[in-house]
Image: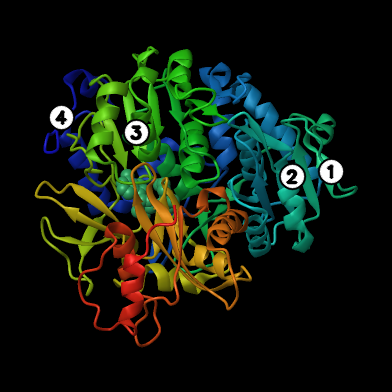
Amino acid sequence: MPNEIYPPSAEFAARAHIGSMDQYRSLYQRSLNQPAEFWGEMAERELAWFEKWTTVFDWQPPQVRWFMGGKLNASYNCIDRHLETWRRNKVALIWEGEPGDSRMISYQELHRLVCRFANVLKSRGLKAGDRAIIYMPMVPELPVALLACARLGIIHSVVFGGFSAEALKTRIQDLEAQVVITADGGYRRGREIKLKPAVDEALTECESVQNVIVLKRTGSETSMREGRDHWWDHLGREEGEVCPAEPMDSEAPLFVLYTSGTTGKPKGIVHSTGGYLLETTLTMKWVFDLRDEDIYWCTADVGWVTGHSYLVYGPLSAGATCLMYEGAPDFPQPDRFWRLIDKYRVNIFYTSPTAIRSFLKQGDQWPAGHDLSSLRLLGSVGEPINPAAWDWYYRVIGGERCPIVDTWWQTETGAIMIAPMPGATSLKPGSGTLPLPGVEADLVDLQGKPLGANQEGYLVLRHPWPSMFRTLWNDPQRYEDNYFKKVPGAYMTGDAARRDEDGYYWILGRVDDVMNVSGHRLSTMEVESALVRHPAVAEAAVVGKPHEITGQSVACFVTLKKGDYDEQQLGGELKQWVAKEIGAFARPEQIRFTEALPKTRSGKIMRRLLREIVTSNSVSGDVTTLEDLSVLARLSSHQDED
Ligand code: PRX
């Protein structure tokens, strides 16, 4: 399997949007040679505009603007325009809750729900340019909230429900949000995960928030603060079902999504309206080969960028029927996903390598009990997919019939950048294959010099693309310094990669201090800052440790302040502390106590050495700059805590 190539089947190619390499090449060449004509044509064909743009794009590195002067609305594009076609009665969302409750929502019904909720927001005095924080479980009202904000031009920022009150607070504060949209709780592994108490805790230090709108999902006891907190249903009862979509500037921010960078402070990635919507819509056809009759399922939570682009905006704008599932993949049994595919006859299934690896481990008996023959295309996102996981996904889930689109992209890129077009591109397991139209990918060395075939280097994107992020909220300088300083005029992705002799890209992983745990980005510095806030901790260094299922796990080296500690107990307490400070998904797998951390003479923690220790429990290479070699020796001989 490792070096095998999988060309598209003639049957798949014959029906695909892009059915040959010639077609791909001609699109790609045109997109680079005549970007303004190419993207202008795409924008006209794919989106509904209230006013046409005057200029396709303006690139003054690092600032880019797309479809200047154009006016449109993302909610209108995701809903209203379908109402003028036969799609008005098409199912937009098929939803299943973890307890097994389900809902089918047509585009017409979605329109009513979104208009009603947009009217609720309006009645609370919210308007274009205001900011809403959305902190909700995976229920239909979550996309409804996004689309209602988009309808009025309110900038939304979804905070993943797994984030803690502390993480929620910093995001509300940075954004100076006026409203928080939340729920009493949601279901995960048969238990209620409460959300409202975290909102209450966060809001003790957020003066900007005047309104909290609470959806009743679980019906459990929830405290409501008079004047500030309102039940979603109570407010909605009085509102009408008509709410015109605001014509928004193409460049108006649609949303801000916080993601981890290399410091302790998350970055607010700002996405625009027109460019973002265009590329998420187009990639539904190019990469997922979406057809009107498809049932499409992206398993990502809307709290991450994949959920924004490929569960809400891309598929709804493209008129898809999307499956949305609330809970855990292994509840009540490890076959829940296969059961859902069978029950709803899913055709396109998009998930993460972490999920695939955990299914593989649980065994073939779980998918074997279900009819998966409706599947015609599989997707993977968030981390490199290893050969064993690819092979299992291809054989056991795809029945050796479904192409796998390995999609490389980032929160910053907004849409998929490197991926196969499944009716054209031959697959090589583990490679995202080729850049999509408009994506001028390249590999460079430390000096910014382009590299040749099979050399490993830094992945950069040279030409701006429509769904590119526009800035970092409240921090334009960091936007420039982080991404555009190292290679003049090019966007630095932070990933290392190799390009083979066929031009295929192989992503090797991050080159900065960002970990990838279950496909979720987590900064080593963020975990370190959380640890040093604990009263017993003097210093902390955090690195990603290779993990069989989640790709990486969080490993921490900690030095303690003077005192008498029960290390066993404190280790457990610190894990809990990080989960509380950031969120349960950031919980360290390992805490190691040490008398000192290995540092250079200038005082910089040598994370490379720590990475080597957690990977192999030994250290090789140059250690002559180490201040105290004995520290290293002690660390290497220390046994794992777990
Ligand atoms: O390192 C790459 C990895 O995930 C990072 C982006 O993380 P985030 O912004 O959270 O977005 C994840 C979902 C798009 C990248 O810098 N990554 C993403 N997709 C792949 C990948 N690594 C390898 N293969 C992929 N298909």
Q: Residue at x 22, y 43 (%)?
A: 431
What is the C-alpha distance between the residues marked 1 and 4? 57 Å
Please indicate whether residue 423 sits to the left or right of residue 336 in the image: left
**Horizontal and vertical percent position of residue 534:** 61, 68
What is the C-alpha distance between the residues marked 1 and 2? 8 Å
Q: Which mark is residue 379?
A: 3
The residue at which mark 1 appears reads as 223
Looking at the image, residue 88 lies above or below residue 357? above
**Horizontal and vertical percent position of residue 122:** 77, 44
**Horizontal and vertical percent position of residue 592:** 45, 63
When asked about the image quadrant of residue 412, the answer is: bottom left
In what element is the residue under mark 3? strand
Of labels 1 and 3, the one closer to you: 1
Q: Residue at x 59, y 30 (%)?
A: 80
What is the C-alpha distance between the residues marked 2 and 3? 34 Å
The residue at which mark 4 appears reads as 7
In what element is the residue under mark 4? loop
Given the image, on which type of amino acid does mark 4 rest? Answer: Pro
In what element is the residue under mark 1? loop
Q: Earlier in the sequence, mark 3 or mark 4?
A: 4
In what element is the residue under mark 2? helix
Question: In front here: 66 or 511?
Answer: 511
Question: In front here: 499 or 20?
Answer: 499
Residues packed near mark 4 inside 10 Å, few (<14), some (14 to 19) or many (20 plus): some
Given the image, on which type of amino acid does mark 3 rest? Answer: Gly
Of labels 2 and 4, the one closer to you: 2
Q: Residue at x 62, y 50 (%)?
A: 156
Is the N terminus in the top left, top right, bottom left or bottom right quadrant?
top left
Please indicate whether residue 511 sits to the left or right of residue 102 in the image: left
When asked about the image quadrant of residue 608, the answer is: bottom left
